[in-house]
Amino acid sequence: MSIETGFADTSPLLPLPPATFHILLAVADGDRHGYGIIQDVAARTGGELKLSAGTLYRSIQRMLEQGLIVETADRPLPELDDERRRYYRITPFGREVARAEARRMSQLVELARASGFVPEGA
Amino acid sequence: MLERLLLHLLPASFRHEYAAEMGAIHAQRKRDAVGIWSRIGLYLEMTADVAVTAAAAHWEILRQDVRQSARTLTRSKGFALTAIGVTALGVGATTAAFSIADHVLIRRLPFPDADRLTMLWESIPGYSRMEPSPANYRDWKNLNSVFESMGAFRGLSVNLSGSGQPENLSGASVTADLLPLLGARPELGRLFSAEDDRDGAAGTAILSDGLWRDRFGGDPGILNRKILLDGSPFTVIGVLPPDFYVPNRFPNQIRLWTAMRFTPADFAYRTNYYLNVLAKLRPGVSLKRAREQMLAISAQLERLYPKGNRKVTATVGDIRELVGDRARVLLIVLAAASLCLLLMTCTNLANLLLARGLLRRKEVAVRTALGAGRERLVRQLLTESMLLALAGGAVGIGLAAEAAPLLAKLVPSGLPIAETFAIDGRAIGLALVLTTLTGIGFGTIPALRTADAAVGGLREGSRSGVGGRRERLRGVLVVAQVTSSVALLVSCGLLMRALWQIENTDPGFRAEGVLTLRTSLPMPKYEKIAPRFRFYEQVLTGVRALPGVRAAGYTSFLPIVMGGGVWPVSVDGAPVEATTNDRASLRFITPGYFAAMGIPLLAGRDVVESDTVTTLAVAIVSQSFVRRYWPGQGALGRHLRILDTEITDWTVEGVAGDVRTRGLERTSEPQVYLPYRQVGDGAFPWYAPKDLAIRGEGDPASLLPAIRRIVAAADPEQPISDVQTLDEVVALDSAPRVVHLRVLGGFALAAFLLAVVGIHGLLSFAVSSRTQEIGVRLAIGARPANIFGMVLRQGAVLCGVGVAVGMAASYLAGRAMQAALAGVRPDDPIAFLAGSALAVLMALAGSVLPALRAVRVDPLSAIRSE
């Protein structure tokens, strides 16, 4: 899989499972460990989506295989770190996929708006 | 603690990566949770989460592995097809063999409370299974307290006439208790009541579903219709459903039932053996207790009736004993053979997988290098062998289902099994278990070996040498294959020898060119001798006048068709004992019978038309009769007595050759033939001649239309039944054996081929892995013959060990199945020699190609490749 080239085709991965998309959003602005991702997703959705540990790591396993994220060796300051933790970083391909997914969703919203399904101002 | 256990549900690869972190998250959550309820909620949530995650992760891996296996297997179609074919063979054979053994020997018979059903016999000197007499049946029934109910029946052959063609039917007359005892529920109408059993009651009959449909078009108005049986009117009172079955020893299917009446005369003789007695044990009463009580009752009856019941005891047998010893042994042999074959296919599969694993070492090693752990590799390889096994199992079940109709012929006819025999859920369940065991059991070691070899292989570089340990394991597997195939071949040989022995047994008559048929004369109508003799005379005169007919004659019962019909006799004026051990197979015959059957007349004369009640009472006896009673003396002019005949003195006027009346495998009683005219009105009605034998030129069956016309002219109401050539009669006697041998032969052939494939595979592999060594040997001057010999020697050693063990196993197998060997010894030299010859052939066939390949090794390129 050509991950780093920027030419990889994102379409086979779309639409993304919601959990995957949320995880991509959570790691978009910095490396995070598993529990950090769960907390971030919960905060971002106002507590609506609480990923379970199982869902999280199954998603992470698949995302690693797909090249959307990588495990990173960079660790935070030792006093903030727990050595059991593993940190994940988004790849350029992961960003591209997230962008493609966002584009797909906003096109969908456009279509819905044209049909009058979206309230004014939304 | 619980949590850690739960995490073990996850696939190892997933667990190694993420379990620690999942645990950390769970710990964090637990710290955040407040209150007992939220903790409990959290626990439940975590449990569900881990379970779902584990299932999903396993499923994901399985999908990957299956996809990967399908890809690799399509790339090596030859290997995949061989493995599938091999497994299909083993699973198919075992499923089929066990399915039939299950139906006949294990499964409950389709009767309500089948485990409480028993059969009762009289055991008299010389015969352990004699049909009880009405008098003893009545007393057993009244005196016992161990049976809930007891009923009796006897076979019946009646002519149905009135509407349409007259037809001879096999039926049974039954006491009123019998049908309820077997759980019969009429489809229409009612069963017999005690009222129908009463002597002198109007005749009542119950039809089988088949007869009702074939003969009466399934007419629902059949109840209360009158039908004519042997010319007497019977009222139809019911129809029994198609699946109803009376366990019996008759070869023919029962098509109608009538009520059995006993007259005082029936109870007069305790030696009047003709009933079949079934009884149902009371709940909680063991077979042992029933036997004890019946023995006590027998002793009591012996004291009361010392004449008729001397040394007579009642035998209580499980209903399954109707499956004879021979059938039982043959089925067990079949099941054992199929297990042998299964074992062979499994070892073959293991060998194939081992060899393939070695060939794939590099591919697997690369995957290891790419990060696949040992556990993942083993799992992937096991998935592959499971896929192969499942595909093979599916094909095997198909094969078994195809073979079912052939195998159904092995089912003894006395029990309701042949009709229902099919490969059903139980058999498929067994096949699935076998398949899974095959796939896992014989895939595990190769998978472990392959994974280990791969890890090591990468380290070792590209050297293509094969570890000695691995080759030894494969050698042991091949030896196991040779062993079981030799055991199968020799067992098959023994049974083949037994069949030859049986087929070469002189039946005592010449069967070719003889047509046989039955005209069973109905009794009140033909009770008087005058009309009876007129019938025989008219039919025989007509038949003998047909072009191409050389001889024709009637007898009471044809040999083999009817094995019984034995009667107490005495010689030289001694009184005849009813319970004597001296019994002869009794037949009334017309002149021409011996000529038609080709039974040689060794001394004296044949019966003639002028032998009547007013002339000297004459008897023709068999050679065995002479040997038994007058050894080394002349028999002509000697005297014999037959129990209960009006004539008390019969003079021997002729000696005939021995006939195997009880079939080719059993010993037969000495025979006594009496002239058909030397009986009075109403005497020996059961022995009235009914089977006609016609010796003709060319195809005897072509005579049939003309014979039908002759019989119809003699009596338009008289049906003809049991039309068959005498050759067919003889063949039918050993038919189950022929089928059995054919199936077993198929197994043995498959085993032979599998062993050849096994030897070939092992040697090919050894040669290809020793290419360099062979190259070096050739380069330093070894002659091709030496190399050829070296490979052959390896094959010979494998075979030699296998043959030695296989021979010992064969001898044990032979001893175990001695009951089915018809006198062939379990160490029969011919079978063993043939087995070893085939083993030599096996070794040669398996080693020639690898040996040739070894000889063709080019020393230069072999050495260069290093």
Image (cartoon, coloured by chain):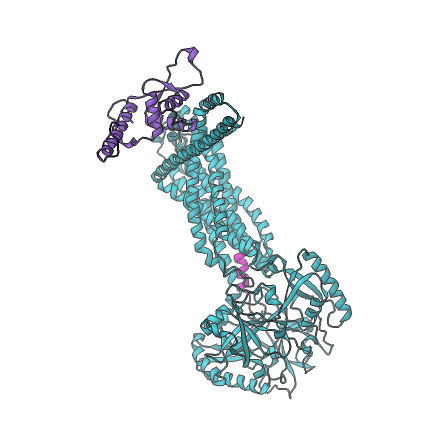
Who's cyan, chain-wise?
A: B
Q: Does the magenta run of residues contain B503?
A: yes
Q: Does the magenta run of residues contain B690?
A: no
Q: Colour of chain A?
A: purple
Which quadrant is the N terminus of chain A positioned in?
top left
Query: To which quarter of the image does residue B689 belong?
Result: bottom right
Number of numbered discs overlaid on the protein picture: 0
Residue B779 shows in this picture? no
Give the percent coordinates (x, y) of residue B3: 51, 27
State the residue at coordinates (43%, 24%). Answer: B17
In the rendered image, the vertical position of residue B468 relative to residue B736, given as above or below: above
Give the percent coordinates (x, y) of residue B157: 55, 74
In the rendered image, the vertical position of residue B702 relative to residue B730, given as above or below: below
Which quadrant is the C terminus of chain A positioned in?
top left
Residue lying at the far left of the rendered structure:
A114
Give B74 or B454, whichever is nearer the viewer: B74
Give B57 or B128, whichever is nearer the viewer: B57
Compared across the picture, whether B127 is left or right of A48 comes to right
State the residue at coordinates (43%, 79%). Answer: B705
In the rendered image, the vertical position of residue B818 relative to residue B590, given as above or below: above
State the residue at coordinates (32%, 18%). Answer: A29
Give the percent coordinates (x, y) of residue A12: 28, 32
Magenta residues, dominant SS class: helix
Q: Which residues are magenta?
A: B495-507
Give the percent coordinates (x, y) of residue A96: 27, 24
